[in-house]
Every structure is written in structure tokens, then in C-alpha cells.
Image: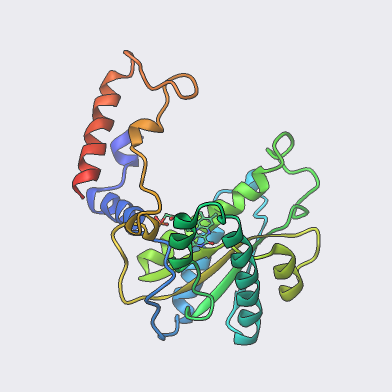
Amino acid sequence: MNTSQNSFVQYEKDAVYKAIFSRRDVRTKFLEEKIPGSVLARILNAAHHAPSVGFSQPWDFILISDMKIRERIKHSFIEEFQKSVKMLESDQERQRKYTSLKLEGILESSLNICITYDPNKFGPFVLGRTSISETGVYSVCCAIQNLWLAARAEGLGMGWVSIISNCKIREILEIPDYVSPVAYLCLGYVSEFENTPDLERSGWLRRLNLENVVCYEKWRVHQSEQWSDLKDEIARTDFNNKGK
Ligand SMILES: Cc1cc2nc3c(=O)[nH]c(=O)nc-3n(C[C@H](O)[C@H](O)[C@H](O)COP(=O)(O)O)c2cc1C
């Protein structure tokens, strides 16, 4: 089979890149609209089709609609957020900016999902995980990204909340000790998706140029004769990004 037969046609490529570039971490502007079961099943199925080390599929998806559970999770967020604010005590301006950010949508979103990692699934010998044990968690992250992109395609906003205690999550969601919570996610329909990350718009950080993160042959080597054509392409890409 030649490469053009393997490629997507243009509108299919456009759709994939549209999902990638318009995906956002969303914590505001959630609507009350419920997520239909058919949509939820589709995006969970997309997550479940992620790559996983040794095909171990080490994830479980805990769906949380119960407000009493969510309030307990929110309480953990508040505690952990307060700790993080203290860490910025030496930099008042940064602390002020940090406290002005909205960093979760636990109660406002229509659904919370906790995604866990179970190292025992199909173990202890998991093909490909024998040297790098983290590959198990990496696999769960692949599922999370699939979920994020599928959600975006369905018009659903999703936000990842990591300012919470994993101990508390384990206790509240009755997750056994050997299983790790990897992500706590808030999902729901939203009134709009921003074009750029909230942290960029608020001036917290900006996206690095692609040029500065692509290395040639060795770590942090950015100069290369051999790669000059690609370097030019990348410079053009960075230029176009700025014009967005
Ligand atoms: C592992 C991980 C943890 C994150 N935790 C939080 C969080 O606790 N609160 C928050 O507001 N955003 C969180 N985010 C979202 C990032 O801030 C966001 O992805 C980044 O600013 C880029 O914005 P974008 O996702 O809209 O492109 C997290 C993202 C990842 C991948």
C-alpha cells in the first residue's frame, strides 16, 4: 500500500488538527446541559482505544455525578490550593496573579471522571514495562488525551484538576492502595472554547516557540546544517502561530 492510500483525505486531516488545536483545558463557562449517554459512551470508548504498554489497558474510568462526593473533592482542592498559595509567599505579585486564576470546575461541570492506573492488570509481566515502570502511567495519560480530544470534537469542555490530594481521592472514591489516581477531570458542555490557553491569556506563561523545543541529533542541540530545511519550515510555523 502506498503512503497516499494510508493517508487521511484532506477534510479528515483538517478534523484531526482542528480537535488538537481547538482543545482547551476548561474550568469556566460550563452549561447545565447533561451529557447524553451515547456521547459519553463514545468518548469513553475513544479513551479505551488509546495505546497501552503491552496492551495492558491499565485504566479504570470512575464517573462521578454525586454532588456530595464532588463537594468532598472540592474541599481537598481548597486545602491543596491554600498550600500552593503559601509556596508563593516570597513573590507577592506572582501570588496575586495565581490566586486570581480559576483552576477547577469540580462543582460547575456536569460530570467528574477520575482515571486510575492499575499496575496489576495483566501483570506482573507486562510486555514493554520491564525496564521502564512509568510506561504504565504513560499509557493512562494516552487514554486521557484521547478522551480530551474526543470530548472536544463532541463540543464538551474538559479540565484536569491536579491540585488535590491523591490520598483524599483514594479515600473518597474507595480506590485500593495499589491503584493510583492519575487524573481528576471535569467535563461538560460549555458556552465557548477560548482560542488560547487561559494561562497564556492571563499572562502566566506563553507557548514556547517550536524551534526551541526541537533538537537535532542530541539533547538541546538546535543548530544543524543537515536539518536546515526542517528548521526553515519550523521557523515559518512559529511565524504563523504568532499571527493567530
Ligand atoms: C497533568 C496536568 C495537570 C493539570 N492540572 C491543572 C490544574 O490543576 N488546574 C488547572 O487549571 N489546569 C490544569 N491543567 C491544565 C493546564 O494548565 C493546561 O493544559 C495548560 O495551561 C495549557 O492550556 P490548554 O490545555 O488550554 O492548551 C493540567 C494539565 C495537565 C496536563
Closer to the camera, 125 or 235? 235
Image point (31%, 40%), residue name? 5
Residue 64 position by quadrant: bottom right
**Left or right: 134 as drawn, with respect to 222:** right
Closer to the camera, 12 or 33? 33
Image point (60%, 54%), residue name? 140
Residue at the limit of the structure toward the left, as seen here: 243
Where residue 232 sits: x, y (%)?
A: 24, 26
For residue 139, above or below residue 38: above
Image point (32%, 67%), residue name? 193
The answer to whether residue 2 is visible is no
Closer to the camera, 88 or 18? 88
For residue 36, above or below residue 187: below
Image point (36%, 64%), residue name? 153
Residue 233 position by quadrant: top left
Closer to the camera, 94 or 195? 94
Residue 196 position by quadrant: bottom left
**Left or right: 214 as drawn, with respect to 165:** left
For residue 33, above or below residue 3: below
Marker count (numbered): 0
Where residue 90 sits: x, y (%)?
A: 55, 52
